[in-house]
Image (cartoon, rainbow, N blue to C red):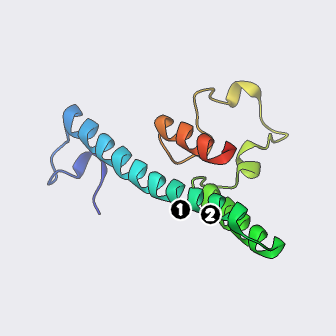
């Protein structure tokens, strides 16, 4: 797939084209994230419906796996401060591996603290 400035038949894309492309990607990403959150929510609900400890653990593990899928690396790896890092190197507005948009963060948080 051709992306970037030459995605439009070899011609440079204008700012409006790039903005529309960004908005389209964000919508698709939000749809995927909402689908994942719905599945995770179902798994979380299933925990209390399970009658055995093994069933509860399996449902919890599946919910954890689904919620972790929104990270490009595990949260522990993304958030770990390395010895060679400086606080000035950290962008306070970054999402540290979270693949969703800012609006998706609230939905993930609500699913986790349910």
Image quarter of the C terminus: top right
Whole-percent x, y for residue 78 in the image? 70, 47
Whole-percent x, y for residue 105 in the image? 55, 39
Question: Could you tell me how far apart the alpha carbons at marks 2 and 1 are, in whole angstroms?
Answer: 6 Å
Residue at the disc numbered 1:
39
Whole-percent x, y for residue 5 in the image? 26, 45
* Badge count: 2
**Mark 1: few/some/many CA within 10 Å (<14, 14-19, 20+):** some
Whole-percent x, y for residue 8 in the image? 17, 50
Image quarter of the N terminus: bottom left
Residue at the image point whose x is 66% and y is 47% from the top: 112
Q: Using residue 36 as the reference point, say whether residue 13 is left or right of it.
A: left
Residue 96 sits above or below residue 66 on the image: above
Which disc is residue 43 wearing? 2
Residue at the image point whose x is 85% and y is 40% from the top: 83
Residue at the image point whose x is 47% and y is 35% from the top: 103
Asked whether 86 or 52 is in front, the reply is 52
Is residue 69 visible in this depiction of the protein? Answer: no
């Amino acid at each position: 797939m051709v992306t970037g400035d030459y995605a439009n038949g070899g011609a440079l894309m204008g700012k409006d084209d790039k903005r529309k492309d960004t908005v389209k990607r964000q919508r698709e990403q939000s749809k995927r994230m909402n689908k994942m959150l719905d599945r995770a929510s179902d798994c979380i609900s299933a925990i209390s419906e399970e009658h055995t400890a093994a069933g509860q653990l399996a449902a919890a593990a599946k919910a954890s796996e689904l919620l972790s899928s929104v990270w490009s690396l595990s949260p522990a790896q993304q958030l770990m401060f390395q010895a060679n890092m400086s606080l000035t190197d950290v962008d306070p507005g970054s999402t540290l591996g979270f693949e969703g948009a800012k609006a998706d963060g609230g939905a993930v948080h609500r699913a986790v603290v349910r």
